[in-house]
Amino acid sequence: MRKIKAVLSVSLLVLAVSGCENIGQLRYLSNVSLDPNGDPAQPAVLAEFEGDAAVNSADEWRDRRASVLREAFQRDLYGYFPDDSEVVVGDVQLIDDDAYEGLATIELVPLTIRTRFGEGEWVERTIRLVLAKPKAATTPSPVILKMDFCPFNETFRHDGLPNGEIEVILPERTGNSNVSCAITGFSPLDRLASYALGRYHVSPPIEEMIARGYAFAAINVLEYVVDSSDFGRKQLELLSRGHDGNAAWGAIAAWASQFSRAIDYLDTDEDLDTNRTAIYGHSRYGKAALVAGAFDDRIDAVIAHQSGRGGAALTRSVVGEPIVEMTATYPDWFSKAYTKRAKDSPELPFDQHQLIALLAPRPVLLGHARRDKWSDPNGAFRAAQGADLVYGLFDSEGLTAERLNEFDPDADIAFWIRPGTHGEVKEDWPAFLEFLDAHF
């Protein structure tokens, strides 16, 4: 193999403004209305769908409709997950037995993810999970699993953890050999950009989580599928060998699977409560968190912050990032079939309220900011309204809010909006933890 160096960096200006996809966001900085407006989510969530009769009960939703929707989302948007997935756990390394002034231990866990499409060969990729656990816990702790691109030493503020340089194996453009790329996932520019998103994006308040009884785990997307339309697409092709390339998973589905493979390990840790596992993602990783929750029933709560189009926001909404621009800028996020189709007709037979409904009756928090029209808070609120009927089937308190600023942490569909733009700021995490406290 030969080695090359690549630095994945993002535009500081764009991220400082709103953290999304391109400079066109500048026209979306005015405050969004706190009153929902626009057409209701379509199609009606309980109506007949693709030959499946109308749904009238929780059993019918769980036994019939959920599988029909999961098939549709894979077929037409996210691409298909592997037929087989498993994880092999490496040697757990104790990084610190007295972290955060004696409140927690920190462990690093290598996880080799093995996937296979059909009867093809298994493909392996090793990632790392870092886990902080409260030392004072006398019973298994609930756990918050976060996904982003920040190096572990930055996220946990601990020098004993790895920095942002990782090795990525890619198929060579020609021939049968591989290229081994050392990817620096957190260049100086990335570090500045991430702090522009809010320091809580880089370093969430782990001490507060530990003090409240939560364990906190983190995985890095760069270790599985690089967040890049060039490198990322090549990795996806490698990970989905043996599958029709047009229908194979895009990056969002691969990241969603990465959440699930991390949970494979977390569910084996006796210090953790397998019935109180929450996942968190911001922006594009918020999209992945929603998809993970929709496809993995072991996930007990989802926090998707500013997930936008392809996440919580309705595709049929006329506000926010156009799906055509998103698929042009990030063709690796969705299946190749949808990226090609979106140029002519981005509308699909379903919409994102049906993705949220696949979480029912588990709690979900949809976070937003008033000057982040790019991620379309209004479209996400109407998607929550559209999903609410399914929560009702389960006798669950779904969306209680009637306006975007009526935050109810006890609701099973909680909607959070604050002043400001795209990112994670001081106000966000207290709301997230209040929501988890209410449900866990």
Image (spheres, grey):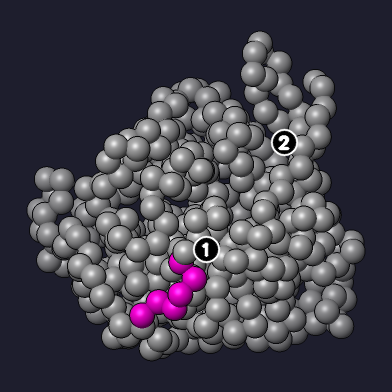
Q: Nearer the viewer, residue 193 or 265?
A: 193
Q: Quadrant of residue 118?
A: top left
Q: Which residue is mark 2?
A: 168
Residue 389 is situated, as x and y percent measured from the top left of the image, at 21, 72
Q: Quadrant of residue 176?
A: top right
Q: Amino acid at mark 2?
A: Val
Provide the secondary structure element on which disc 2 rests.
Answer: strand
At x 44%, y 26%, the residue is: 245
Residue 281 is situated, as x and y percent measured from the top left of the image, at 55, 63
Q: Main secondary structure of the magenta part?
A: loop
Provide the secondary structure element on which disc 1 rests.
Answer: helix
Q: Earlier in the sequence, mark 1 or mark 2?
A: 1
Q: Is residue 85 visible?
A: yes
Q: Estimate the spatial distance between the alpha carbons at disc 1 and disc 2, rounded to whole Å.
A: 34 Å
**Quarter of the image with the N terminus in it:** top right
Left or right: where 112 falls relative to 73:
right
Tag count in the figure? 2
Q: Residue furthest front?
A: 27
Left or right: where 19 falls relative to 379:
right
Q: Is residue 153 magenta?
A: no
**Residue interval drawn in magenta:** 28-33
Q: Is residue 417 above or below residue 250?
A: below
Left or right: where 304 falls relative to 13:
left
Q: Amino acid at mark 1?
A: Leu
What label does residue 26 carry, if any?
Answer: 1
Judged by depth in the image, the label closer to the viewer, 1 or 2, is: 1
Residue 216 is situated, as x and y percent measured from the top left of the image, at 67, 70
Q: Is residue 98 above or below residue 349?
A: below
Q: Dot 1, crowdedness within 10 Å: few (<14), some or many (≥20)?
A: some
At x 38%, y 53%, the residue is: 322
Residue 228 is situated, as x and y percent measured from the top left of the image, at 61, 41
